[in-house]
Image: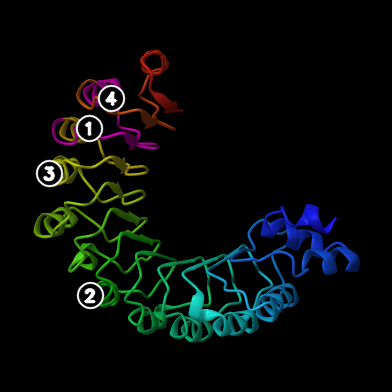
């Protein structure tokens, strides 16, 4: 049984450990060198006790934990984060999603003890606030950063972080209502993926910031849920980012076929386009895209009510993957 468990993913081992004492003991045997602790998928989320025992096991075996993912762990508290801080020297990847009891103070302690950290995601952790910025500014090695639902996070806060993280390749900012296009000032020229999603203050000024910056490496861009963007901004966007491969304009409700025409003229290397919930998009705009962007393979057309079933059938027959 121990040999069988040695092939199980970490999340499944944790689930086994919650069933009975015997399986709990076997699941945490020294025979498995865990480097990536992924607590996602555990029914009800991992508890402090389970997290503590897993980390104790790692410490006893003098193993190095390089990645920890805490997804949907409503019972996890700062006690577990303090234990993680003791393993921080080897940590390179940290993911916190839907951990409502984890606070900023505990995360700051953890970040202060993770000198090798490269990837960090903080999403829907309601007790974490903008005070975490100070600690993020002490993580110059970050290459991927995702922040969401930080309701007091400001443009200046983001600028402070990106000034330090010169090697940033992915930046995701979601549901941060105080952010505007000014948050883009000083972004790293190494950026390959930029996701600005559900930012109600973001408007057409974002194009001016992009025009002034160095985005030659950018391949993926998302403005999902940014409802103040207009056709003018999308048309100009294609002038400055012709190298884009993936673009999401989902839930940008006021965009029309004029946006797709501009994108078709400028972003000819596009491979994936998401215009779901853009109710003003019609067959004409999609035909412009399909005929001009010859590398395009994927289209998300969910809730595009003016797009006919006949066109969707034609696109699928032409080899497009269409999500409808």
Instruction: Compare marks 3 and 2 and give the one earlier in the sequence.
Output: 2
Give SS at disc 3: helix
Instruction: Compare marks 4 and 3 and give the one earlier in the sequence.
Output: 3
Give SS at disc 4: helix
Query: Distance from label 1 to label 2 (Cα)?
Result: 34 Å
Q: Position of residue 231 (x, y in %)?
A: 19, 40
Please name the residue that numbered disc 4 is placed on. Answer: 286
Give SS at disc 2: helix
**Disc 4: CA contacts within 10 A as few (<14), some (14-19) or many (>=20):** many
Numbered range of the magenta stretch: 265-290
**Disc 3: CA contacts within 10 A as few (<14), some (14-19) or many (>=20):** some
Q: Is residue 22 above or below residue 152?
A: above
Q: Position of residue 23 (x, y in %)?
A: 86, 63
Residue toward you, 268 or 173: 268
Query: Distance from label 4 to label 3 (Cα)?
Result: 18 Å
Marks 3, 2: nearer the viewer? 2
Please name the residue that numbered disc 2 is placed on. Answer: 163
| Quadrant assignment, res 202 | bottom left
Q: Are marks 4 and 1 in contact (CB under 8 Å)?
A: yes
Query: Distance from label 4 to label 2 (Cα)?
Result: 39 Å
Q: Position of residue 174 (x, y in %)?
A: 39, 60
Q: Is residue 68 above or below residue 264?
A: below
Queried whether the magenta region covers residue 220, the answer comes back as no
Please name the residue that numbered disc 1 is placed on. Answer: 260
């Amino acid at each position: 049984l121990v040999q069988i468990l040695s092939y199980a993913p970490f999340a499944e081992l944790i689930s086994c450990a919650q069933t009975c004492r015997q399986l709990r003991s076997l699941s945490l045997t020294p025979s498995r060198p865990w480097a990536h602790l992924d607590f996602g998928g555990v029914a009800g989320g991992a508890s402090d006790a389970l997290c503590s025992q897993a980390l104790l096991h790692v410490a006893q075996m003098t193993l190095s934990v390089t990645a920890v993912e805490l997804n949907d762990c409503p019972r996890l508290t700062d006690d577990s984060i303090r234990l993680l801080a003791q393993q921080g020297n080897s940590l390179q990847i940290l993911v916190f999603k839907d951990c409502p009891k984890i606070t900023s103070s505990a995360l700051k302690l953890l970040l202060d003890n993770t000198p090798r950290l490269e990837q960090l995601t903080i999403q829907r952790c309601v007790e974490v606030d903008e005070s975490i910025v100070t600690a993020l500014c002490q993580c110059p090695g970050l290459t991927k950063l995702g922040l969401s639902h930080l309701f007091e996070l400001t443009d200046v806060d983001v600028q402070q972080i990106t000034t330090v993280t010169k090697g940033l390749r992915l930046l995701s900012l979601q549901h941060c209502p105080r952010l505007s296009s000014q948050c883009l000032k000083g972004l790293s020229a190494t950026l390959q993926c930029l996701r600005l999603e559900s930012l109600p203050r973001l408007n057409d000024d974002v194009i001016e910031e992009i025009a002034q910056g160095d985005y030659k490496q950018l391949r993926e861009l998302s403005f999902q849920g940014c409802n103040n963007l207009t056709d003018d901004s999308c048309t100009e966007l294609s002038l400055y980012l012709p190298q884009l491969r993936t673009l999401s304009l989902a839930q940008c409700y006021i965009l029309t076929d004029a946006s797709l025409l501009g994108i078709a003229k400028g972003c000819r290397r596009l491979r994936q386009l998401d215009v779901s919930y853009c109710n003003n998009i019609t067959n004409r705009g999609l035909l412009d895209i399909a005929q001009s962007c010859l590398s395009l393979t994927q289209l998300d057309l969910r809730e595009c009510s003016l797009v006919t079933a006949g066109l969707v059938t034609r696109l699928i027959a032409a080899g497009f993957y269409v999500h409808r």
